[in-house]
Protein backbone atom coordinates (compact mmCIF):
# COMPACT_ATOMS: atom_id res chain seq x y z
CA UNK A 1 0.00 0.00 0.00
CA UNK A 2 1.30 3.46 -0.77
CA UNK A 3 0.87 6.41 1.56
CA UNK A 4 -2.31 7.66 -0.07
CA UNK A 5 -3.93 4.22 0.08
CA UNK A 6 -3.07 3.96 3.77
CA UNK A 7 -4.62 7.36 4.42
CA UNK A 8 -7.79 6.41 2.56
CA UNK A 9 -7.92 3.07 4.39
CA UNK A 10 -7.61 4.78 7.76
CA UNK A 11 -10.40 7.22 6.94
CA UNK A 12 -12.62 4.36 5.78
CA UNK A 13 -12.16 2.58 9.14
CA UNK A 14 -12.97 5.71 11.12
CA UNK A 15 -15.95 6.58 8.97
CA UNK A 16 -17.43 3.12 9.20
CA UNK A 17 -16.99 3.01 13.00
CA UNK A 18 -18.66 6.41 13.39
CA UNK A 19 -22.25 6.21 14.62
CA UNK A 20 -24.00 8.96 12.62
CA UNK A 21 -27.07 8.80 14.73
CA UNK A 22 -25.43 9.33 18.12
CA UNK A 23 -22.30 11.17 16.99
CA UNK A 24 -19.51 9.00 18.41
CA UNK A 25 -17.12 6.31 17.21
CA UNK A 26 -16.85 2.73 18.44
CA UNK A 27 -13.34 1.35 18.92
CA UNK A 28 -14.20 -1.80 16.96
CA UNK A 29 -17.33 -3.55 15.74
CA UNK A 30 -18.64 -6.36 17.96
CA UNK A 31 -15.76 -6.35 20.46
CA UNK A 32 -16.25 -2.77 21.69
CA UNK A 33 -19.68 -1.49 20.62
CA UNK A 34 -19.90 1.68 22.81
CA UNK A 35 -17.91 4.87 23.32
CA UNK A 36 -14.63 4.41 25.19
CA UNK A 37 -12.86 7.35 26.81
CA UNK A 38 -9.23 7.17 25.71
CA UNK A 39 -10.17 5.60 22.40
CA UNK A 40 -12.30 8.63 21.62
CA UNK A 41 -9.45 10.97 22.42
CA UNK A 42 -7.13 9.27 19.93
CA UNK A 43 -9.95 8.95 17.42
CA UNK A 44 -10.62 12.70 17.60
CA UNK A 45 -6.98 13.37 16.65
CA UNK A 46 -7.48 11.22 13.54
CA UNK A 47 -10.70 12.99 12.56
CA UNK A 48 -9.08 16.39 13.04
CA UNK A 49 -6.92 15.68 10.00
CA UNK A 50 -9.84 15.50 7.60
CA UNK A 51 -13.16 16.24 9.31
CA UNK A 52 -12.88 18.70 12.18
CA UNK A 53 -16.62 18.60 12.88
CA UNK A 54 -16.42 14.90 13.64
CA UNK A 55 -13.44 15.51 15.94
CA UNK A 56 -15.50 18.03 17.92
CA UNK A 57 -18.50 15.76 17.95
CA UNK A 58 -16.43 12.84 19.29
CA UNK A 59 -15.24 14.89 22.25
CA UNK A 60 -18.57 16.48 23.03
CA UNK A 61 -20.39 13.17 22.94
CA UNK A 62 -17.85 11.74 25.40
CA UNK A 63 -18.31 14.79 27.63
CA UNK A 64 -22.07 14.26 27.59
CA UNK A 65 -21.29 11.32 29.89
CA UNK A 66 -19.33 13.45 32.37
CA UNK A 67 -20.60 13.35 35.95
CA UNK A 68 -21.58 16.48 37.89
CA UNK A 69 -18.49 16.09 40.09
CA UNK A 70 -16.13 16.29 37.10
CA UNK A 71 -15.54 12.54 36.75
CA UNK A 72 -15.34 11.28 33.14
CA UNK A 73 -16.21 7.59 32.84
CA UNK A 74 -14.39 4.97 30.80
CA UNK A 75 -17.44 3.98 28.75
CA UNK A 76 -20.49 6.02 27.74
CA UNK A 77 -23.42 3.83 26.72
CA UNK A 78 -25.23 6.00 24.16
CA UNK A 79 -26.62 2.96 22.39
CA UNK A 80 -27.86 -0.56 23.04
CA UNK A 81 -25.76 -3.60 22.19
CA UNK A 82 -25.67 -7.21 23.30
CA UNK A 83 -22.20 -7.96 21.94
CA UNK A 84 -20.28 -6.75 25.03
CA UNK A 85 -20.01 -7.76 28.66
CA UNK A 86 -20.19 -6.05 31.16
CA UNK A 87 -22.73 -3.55 29.84
CA UNK A 88 -24.67 -0.68 31.44
CA UNK A 89 -26.92 -2.86 33.59
CA UNK A 90 -23.88 -4.37 35.21
CA UNK A 91 -21.99 -1.11 35.80
CA UNK A 92 -24.99 0.76 37.28
CA UNK A 93 -23.68 4.32 37.20
CA UNK A 94 -27.07 5.39 38.56
CA UNK A 95 -25.83 4.27 42.00
CA UNK A 96 -23.77 7.46 42.26
CA UNK A 97 -25.71 10.69 42.84
CA UNK A 98 -23.50 12.74 40.48
CA UNK A 99 -23.84 10.43 37.47
CA UNK A 100 -25.77 11.84 34.51
CA UNK A 101 -29.38 10.76 34.27
CA UNK A 102 -29.99 10.88 30.51
CA UNK A 103 -27.11 8.54 29.66
CA UNK A 104 -25.64 5.46 31.34
CA UNK A 105 -21.91 5.14 31.93
CA UNK A 106 -19.41 3.09 33.87
CA UNK A 107 -18.14 4.17 37.31
CA UNK A 108 -14.46 3.73 36.46
CA UNK A 109 -12.35 6.05 34.32
CA UNK A 110 -9.49 5.77 31.81
CA UNK A 111 -6.24 7.65 31.08
CA UNK A 112 -7.21 11.36 30.95
CA UNK A 113 -6.24 12.12 27.38
CA UNK A 114 -8.71 14.91 26.66
CA UNK A 115 -6.48 17.79 27.76
CA UNK A 116 -3.65 16.98 25.39
CA UNK A 117 -6.12 15.92 22.70
CA UNK A 118 -7.66 19.42 22.73
CA UNK A 119 -4.21 20.87 22.14
CA UNK A 120 -3.47 18.40 19.34
CA UNK A 121 -6.72 19.34 17.65
CA UNK A 122 -5.97 23.02 18.06
CA UNK A 123 -2.57 22.51 16.42
CA UNK A 124 -4.05 20.51 13.53
CA UNK A 125 -7.07 22.75 12.83
CA UNK A 126 -6.66 25.26 10.03
CA UNK A 127 -9.38 27.60 11.31
CA UNK A 128 -7.95 28.62 14.70
CA UNK A 129 -10.78 30.98 15.57
CA UNK A 130 -13.39 28.33 15.05
CA UNK A 131 -11.52 25.68 17.02
CA UNK A 132 -10.91 28.13 19.86
CA UNK A 133 -14.66 28.58 20.20
CA UNK A 134 -14.99 24.85 20.61
CA UNK A 135 -12.12 24.73 23.11
CA UNK A 136 -13.59 27.57 25.18
CA UNK A 137 -16.84 25.65 25.36
CA UNK A 138 -15.18 22.52 26.74
CA UNK A 139 -11.90 23.30 28.45
CA UNK A 140 -13.34 23.94 31.92
CA UNK A 141 -14.95 20.50 31.90
CA UNK A 142 -11.55 18.94 31.50
CA UNK A 143 -10.07 21.20 34.16
CA UNK A 144 -12.85 20.02 36.50
CA UNK A 145 -11.98 16.44 35.66
CA UNK A 146 -8.38 17.05 36.73
CA UNK A 147 -9.60 18.77 39.89
CA UNK A 148 -11.65 15.68 40.66
CA UNK A 149 -8.56 13.48 40.34
CA UNK A 150 -6.38 15.59 42.61
CA UNK A 151 -9.18 15.97 45.14
CA UNK A 152 -10.28 12.33 45.34
CA UNK A 153 -7.49 10.16 44.02
CA UNK A 154 -4.39 11.60 45.69
CA UNK A 155 -4.71 10.70 49.39
CA UNK A 156 -1.16 11.79 50.35
CA UNK A 157 -1.29 15.00 48.35
CA UNK A 158 1.64 13.92 46.19
CA UNK A 159 0.39 15.08 42.81
CA UNK A 160 0.17 11.41 41.81
CA UNK A 161 -3.30 9.96 41.39
CA UNK A 162 -4.24 6.32 41.76
CA UNK A 163 -6.43 4.02 39.74
CA UNK A 164 -8.63 1.47 41.48
CA UNK A 165 -9.27 -0.87 38.58
CA UNK A 166 -7.10 -2.39 35.87
CA UNK A 167 -9.61 -1.22 33.26
CA UNK A 168 -8.81 2.33 34.38
CA UNK A 169 -5.20 1.81 33.30
CA UNK A 170 -6.16 0.92 29.73
CA UNK A 171 -3.52 -1.85 29.89
CA UNK A 172 -6.14 -4.31 31.09
CA UNK A 173 -4.37 -7.61 31.71
CA UNK A 174 -0.75 -6.54 32.05
CA UNK A 175 1.39 -8.90 34.18
CA UNK A 176 1.81 -5.81 36.40
CA UNK A 177 -1.44 -6.76 38.12
CA UNK A 178 -0.68 -10.45 38.64
CA UNK A 179 0.55 -10.09 42.20
CA UNK A 180 -2.49 -8.05 43.14
CA UNK A 181 -4.77 -10.75 41.75
CA UNK A 182 -2.94 -13.22 43.99
CA UNK A 183 -3.91 -11.18 47.05
CA UNK A 184 -7.59 -11.51 46.05
CA UNK A 185 -10.00 -14.35 46.38
CA UNK A 186 -12.98 -13.44 44.20
CA UNK A 187 -16.00 -15.71 43.97
CA UNK A 188 -16.52 -17.53 40.66
CA UNK A 189 -19.16 -15.20 39.23
CA UNK A 190 -21.77 -16.42 36.76
CA UNK A 191 -21.68 -14.40 33.54
CA UNK A 192 -21.23 -14.85 29.86
CA UNK A 193 -18.06 -13.41 28.36
CA UNK A 194 -18.59 -11.86 24.95
CA UNK A 195 -15.03 -10.81 24.08
CA UNK A 196 -13.92 -14.40 23.46
CA UNK A 197 -16.71 -14.86 20.92
CA UNK A 198 -15.08 -12.14 18.79
CA UNK A 199 -11.39 -12.84 19.38
CA UNK A 200 -9.42 -16.05 20.06
CA UNK A 201 -9.29 -16.68 23.83
CA UNK A 202 -5.49 -17.07 23.71
CA UNK A 203 -5.34 -13.34 22.88
CA UNK A 204 -7.65 -12.24 25.74
CA UNK A 205 -7.62 -12.23 29.58
CA UNK A 206 -8.45 -15.46 31.48
CA UNK A 207 -11.71 -16.16 33.36
CA UNK A 208 -9.93 -15.97 36.71
CA UNK A 209 -8.73 -12.49 35.72
CA UNK A 210 -12.30 -11.53 34.78
CA UNK A 211 -13.51 -12.65 38.22
CA UNK A 212 -10.96 -10.29 39.79
CA UNK A 213 -12.02 -7.45 37.49
CA UNK A 214 -15.66 -7.94 38.46
CA UNK A 215 -14.85 -8.28 42.12
CA UNK A 216 -13.28 -4.81 42.14
CA UNK A 217 -16.43 -3.44 40.55
CA UNK A 218 -18.60 -5.25 43.08
CA UNK A 219 -16.74 -3.53 45.91
CA UNK A 220 -17.20 -0.13 44.28
CA UNK A 221 -20.87 -0.75 43.52
CA UNK A 222 -21.57 -1.98 47.06
CA UNK A 223 -20.56 1.55 48.13
CA UNK A 224 -22.30 3.38 45.30
CA UNK A 225 -18.96 4.31 43.71
CA UNK A 226 -18.05 6.46 46.70
CA UNK A 227 -14.40 7.47 46.16
CA UNK A 228 -13.58 7.57 49.89
CA UNK A 229 -14.92 4.07 50.47
CA UNK A 230 -13.11 2.73 47.44
CA UNK A 231 -9.83 4.19 48.69
CA UNK A 232 -10.44 2.49 52.02
CA UNK A 233 -11.48 -0.91 50.70
CA UNK A 234 -10.18 -1.65 47.23
CA UNK A 235 -7.36 -4.23 47.11
CA UNK A 236 -6.32 -2.52 43.88
CA UNK A 237 -4.90 1.01 44.37
CA UNK A 238 -2.09 1.74 41.96
CA UNK A 239 -0.15 4.81 40.86
CA UNK A 240 0.30 4.17 37.18
CA UNK A 241 3.12 5.92 35.27
CA UNK A 242 1.14 5.90 32.00
CA UNK A 243 -2.00 7.34 33.59
CA UNK A 244 -0.07 10.00 35.51
CA UNK A 245 2.14 10.90 32.55
CA UNK A 246 -0.99 11.45 30.48
CA UNK A 247 -2.53 13.57 33.23
CA UNK A 248 0.64 15.66 33.47
CA UNK A 249 0.78 16.11 29.71
CA UNK A 250 -2.89 17.11 29.75
CA UNK A 251 -2.21 19.64 32.54
CA UNK A 252 0.55 21.12 30.37
CA UNK A 253 -1.84 21.34 27.42
CA UNK A 254 -4.52 23.05 29.53
CA UNK A 255 -1.97 25.65 30.67
CA UNK A 256 -1.00 26.33 27.04
CA UNK A 257 -4.62 26.57 25.92
CA UNK A 258 -5.69 28.84 28.79
CA UNK A 259 -2.75 31.08 27.90
CA UNK A 260 -3.94 31.23 24.29
CA UNK A 261 -7.49 32.01 25.43
CA UNK A 262 -6.28 34.66 27.91
CA UNK A 263 -7.48 35.35 31.46
CA UNK A 264 -7.97 32.27 33.63
CA UNK A 265 -4.89 33.13 35.71
CA UNK A 266 -6.20 31.39 38.75
CA UNK A 267 -6.62 28.10 36.91
CA UNK A 268 -3.20 28.45 35.31
CA UNK A 269 -1.61 28.93 38.73
CA UNK A 270 -3.36 25.90 40.13
CA UNK A 271 -2.39 23.78 37.12
CA UNK A 272 1.23 24.88 37.53
CA UNK A 273 1.24 23.96 41.20
CA UNK A 274 -0.11 20.49 40.34
CA UNK A 275 2.61 20.14 37.72
CA UNK A 276 5.48 21.02 40.07
CA UNK A 277 4.32 18.64 42.74
CA UNK A 278 3.45 15.84 40.33
CA UNK A 279 6.72 15.92 38.40
CA UNK A 280 8.85 16.00 41.53
CA UNK A 281 7.07 13.08 43.13
CA UNK A 282 6.95 11.14 39.87
CA UNK A 283 10.73 11.32 39.71
CA UNK A 284 11.16 10.31 43.35
CA UNK A 285 8.65 7.53 43.46
CA UNK A 286 8.15 5.96 40.06
CA UNK A 287 11.69 5.49 38.76
CA UNK A 288 13.48 2.20 39.31
CA UNK A 289 17.26 2.65 39.05
CA UNK A 290 18.00 -1.02 38.58
CA UNK A 291 15.65 -1.32 35.61
CA UNK A 292 16.51 2.14 34.30
CA UNK A 293 12.76 2.52 33.83
CA UNK A 294 9.65 4.05 35.29
CA UNK A 295 7.45 1.54 37.07
CA UNK A 296 4.04 1.23 38.72
CA UNK A 297 3.53 1.79 42.44
CA UNK A 298 1.22 -0.43 44.46
CA UNK A 299 -0.24 2.09 46.86
CA UNK A 300 -2.28 -0.49 48.76
CA UNK A 301 0.82 -2.54 49.61
CA UNK A 302 3.19 0.40 49.54
CA UNK A 303 5.81 -0.87 47.09
CA UNK A 304 7.01 -0.47 43.53
CA UNK A 305 5.92 -3.12 41.04
CA UNK A 306 9.32 -3.60 39.48
CA UNK A 307 8.71 -4.46 35.83
CA UNK A 308 9.45 -2.54 32.66
CA UNK A 309 6.52 -2.09 30.27
CA UNK A 310 5.78 0.14 27.30
CA UNK A 311 4.19 2.53 29.85
CA UNK A 312 7.68 2.99 31.36
CA UNK A 313 8.67 5.18 28.41
CA UNK A 314 5.63 7.47 28.28
CA UNK A 315 6.95 10.02 30.81
CA UNK A 316 9.02 11.32 27.88
CA UNK A 317 5.76 12.40 26.26
CA UNK A 318 5.00 14.57 29.28
CA UNK A 319 8.51 16.02 29.57
CA UNK A 320 9.03 14.54 33.03
CA UNK A 321 12.65 13.25 33.14
CA UNK A 322 15.73 15.44 32.95
CA UNK A 323 18.15 14.73 30.12
CA UNK A 324 20.34 12.40 32.14
CA UNK A 325 17.46 10.23 33.21
CA UNK A 326 15.96 10.35 29.73
CA UNK A 327 19.24 8.95 28.38
CA UNK A 328 19.07 6.09 30.82
CA UNK A 329 15.46 5.42 29.91
CA UNK A 330 16.14 5.39 26.18
CA UNK A 331 19.09 3.04 26.70
CA UNK A 332 16.81 0.62 28.46
CA UNK A 333 14.21 0.99 25.69
CA UNK A 334 16.77 0.08 23.05
CA UNK A 335 18.45 -2.71 24.99
CA UNK A 336 15.40 -4.46 26.39
CA UNK A 337 12.61 -3.71 23.90
CA UNK A 338 14.55 -2.88 20.75
CA UNK A 339 16.96 -5.79 20.22
CA UNK A 340 17.59 -7.08 16.71
CA UNK A 341 14.89 -9.74 16.79
CA UNK A 342 12.12 -7.34 17.90
CA UNK A 343 10.05 -4.53 16.51
CA UNK A 344 9.22 -1.67 18.87
CA UNK A 345 7.57 -1.55 21.31
CA UNK A 346 6.37 -4.66 23.15
CA UNK A 347 3.86 -3.83 25.89
CA UNK A 348 5.75 -5.92 28.44
CA UNK A 349 9.44 -6.61 29.04
CA UNK A 350 10.32 -9.23 26.38
CA UNK A 351 13.07 -10.61 28.61
CA UNK A 352 10.66 -11.39 31.45
CA UNK A 353 9.22 -14.84 32.10
CA UNK A 354 5.77 -13.19 32.16
CA UNK A 355 6.08 -11.92 28.61
CA UNK A 356 3.49 -13.38 26.26
CA UNK A 357 3.86 -12.13 22.67
CA UNK A 358 0.28 -12.88 21.60
CA UNK A 359 -1.84 -11.97 24.60
CA UNK A 360 -3.40 -8.51 24.72
CA UNK A 361 -1.36 -6.32 27.13
CA UNK A 362 1.08 -9.03 28.18
CA UNK A 363 3.48 -8.46 25.29
CA UNK A 364 2.00 -7.32 21.96
CA UNK A 365 2.72 -3.93 20.38
CA UNK A 366 -0.06 -1.31 20.57
CA UNK A 367 -0.31 1.60 18.16
CA UNK A 368 -1.34 4.17 20.77
CA UNK A 369 1.58 3.35 23.06
CA UNK A 370 3.93 3.52 20.09
CA UNK A 371 2.50 6.92 19.23
CA UNK A 372 2.97 8.25 22.78
CA UNK A 373 6.54 6.97 22.95
CA UNK A 374 7.29 8.29 19.47
CA UNK A 375 6.14 11.75 20.50
CA UNK A 376 8.20 11.52 23.68
CA UNK A 377 11.35 10.53 21.82
CA UNK A 378 10.91 13.43 19.44
CA UNK A 379 10.31 15.85 22.28
CA UNK A 380 13.76 14.97 23.69
CA UNK A 381 15.50 14.87 20.32
CA UNK A 382 16.11 11.09 20.05
CA UNK A 383 15.36 11.33 16.38
CA UNK A 384 16.94 8.14 15.11
CA UNK A 385 15.08 5.81 17.42
CA UNK A 386 11.92 7.89 16.92
CA UNK A 387 12.21 7.37 13.18
CA UNK A 388 12.63 3.64 13.63
CA UNK A 389 9.59 3.47 15.92
CA UNK A 390 7.44 5.36 13.44
CA UNK A 391 8.52 3.21 10.51
CA UNK A 392 7.97 -0.05 12.35
CA UNK A 393 4.51 1.11 13.43
CA UNK A 394 3.52 1.94 9.86
CA UNK A 395 4.99 -1.35 8.60
CA UNK A 396 2.55 -3.33 10.74
CA UNK A 397 -0.42 -1.43 9.37
CA UNK A 398 0.82 -1.59 5.80
CA UNK A 399 1.11 -5.36 5.83
CA UNK A 400 -1.85 -6.27 8.03
CA UNK A 401 -4.30 -3.40 8.17
CA UNK A 402 -5.67 -1.57 11.20
CA UNK A 403 -5.58 -4.34 13.81
CA UNK A 404 -5.80 -3.85 17.55
CA UNK A 405 -2.34 -5.23 18.52
CA UNK A 406 0.67 -6.91 16.96
CA UNK A 407 3.39 -9.46 17.66
CA UNK A 408 6.74 -7.80 18.36
CA UNK A 409 8.83 -10.77 17.17
CA UNK A 410 10.35 -10.11 13.77
CA UNK A 411 10.18 -13.77 12.77
CA UNK A 412 6.39 -13.65 13.28
CA UNK A 413 5.85 -10.57 11.15
CA UNK A 414 3.78 -12.39 8.52
CA UNK A 415 1.22 -13.43 11.16
CA UNK A 416 1.62 -10.57 13.59
CA UNK A 417 -1.91 -9.14 13.71
CA UNK A 418 -4.13 -9.86 16.72
CA UNK A 419 -7.34 -8.74 18.47
CA UNK A 420 -10.01 -6.67 16.76
CA UNK A 421 -9.87 -5.81 13.06
CA UNK A 422 -10.51 -2.27 11.77
CA UNK A 423 -9.62 -0.83 15.13
CA UNK A 424 -10.31 2.89 15.32
CA UNK A 425 -7.30 4.25 17.19
CA UNK A 426 -4.93 2.23 15.01
CA UNK A 427 -6.48 4.04 12.04
CA UNK A 428 -6.59 7.46 13.72
CA UNK A 429 -3.00 7.47 14.89
CA UNK A 430 -1.71 6.09 11.60
CA UNK A 431 -3.38 9.07 9.97
CA UNK A 432 -1.64 11.36 12.41
CA UNK A 433 1.77 9.76 11.77
CA UNK A 434 1.30 9.96 8.02
CA UNK A 435 0.16 13.57 8.10
CA UNK A 436 3.12 14.82 10.08
C1 LIG B 1 -12.40 -4.65 27.57
O1 LIG B 1 -13.55 -5.02 27.74
O2 LIG B 1 -11.48 -5.42 27.25
C2 LIG B 1 -12.10 -3.23 27.70
O3 LIG B 1 -10.78 -2.95 27.43
C3 LIG B 1 -12.48 -2.72 29.06
O4 LIG B 1 -12.44 -1.36 29.00
Image: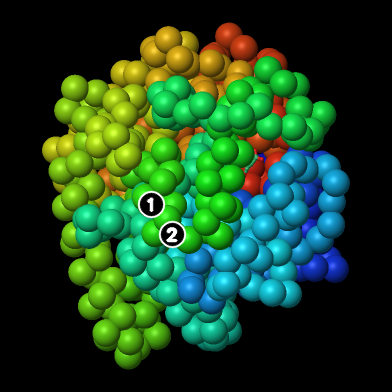
- The span from disc 1 to disc 2 (Cα, nearest Å) is 6 Å
Residue 227 shows which numbered tag? 2
Residue 97 shows which numbered tag? none
**Quadrant of res 241:** top left
Residue shown at the point (55%, 25%) measured from the top left: 364
Mark 2 vs ligand 1: CB below 8 Å: no
Colouring scheme applied when the structure was drawn: rainbow
**Quadrant of res 137:** bottom right
Residue shown at the point (58%, 53%) measured from the top left: 221
- Figure check: 94 above or below 3: below
Residue 231 shows which numbered tag? 1
Measured from the top left, where is residue 235 in percent x and y?
42, 38
Q: Nearer the viewer, residue 324 or 238?
A: 238
Residue shown at the point (30%, 57%) measured from the top left: 154
Give the structural element (helix, strand or loop) at label 1.
helix
**Quarter of the image where the N terminus is located:** top right
Q: Quadrant of ligand 1?
A: top right
Measured from the top left, where is residue 287 in percent x and y?
22, 36
**Proximity of marks 1 and 2: CB atoms separated by less than 8 Å:** yes
Amino acid sequence: MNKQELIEGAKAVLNSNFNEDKGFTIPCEGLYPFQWHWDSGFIAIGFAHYDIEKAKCEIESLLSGQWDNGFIPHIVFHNESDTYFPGPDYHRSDLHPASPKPVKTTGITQPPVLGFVLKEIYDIASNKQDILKFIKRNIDKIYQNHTHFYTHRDPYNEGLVYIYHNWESGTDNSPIWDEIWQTMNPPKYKYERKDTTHVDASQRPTNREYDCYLHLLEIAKAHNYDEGKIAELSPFLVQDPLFNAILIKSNEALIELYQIIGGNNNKIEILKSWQDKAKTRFEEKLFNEELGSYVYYDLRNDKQIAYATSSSFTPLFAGIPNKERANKLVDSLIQNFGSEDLFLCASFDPKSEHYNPVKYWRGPVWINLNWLIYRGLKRYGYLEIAKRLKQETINYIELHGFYEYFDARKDQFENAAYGGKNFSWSAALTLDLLNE
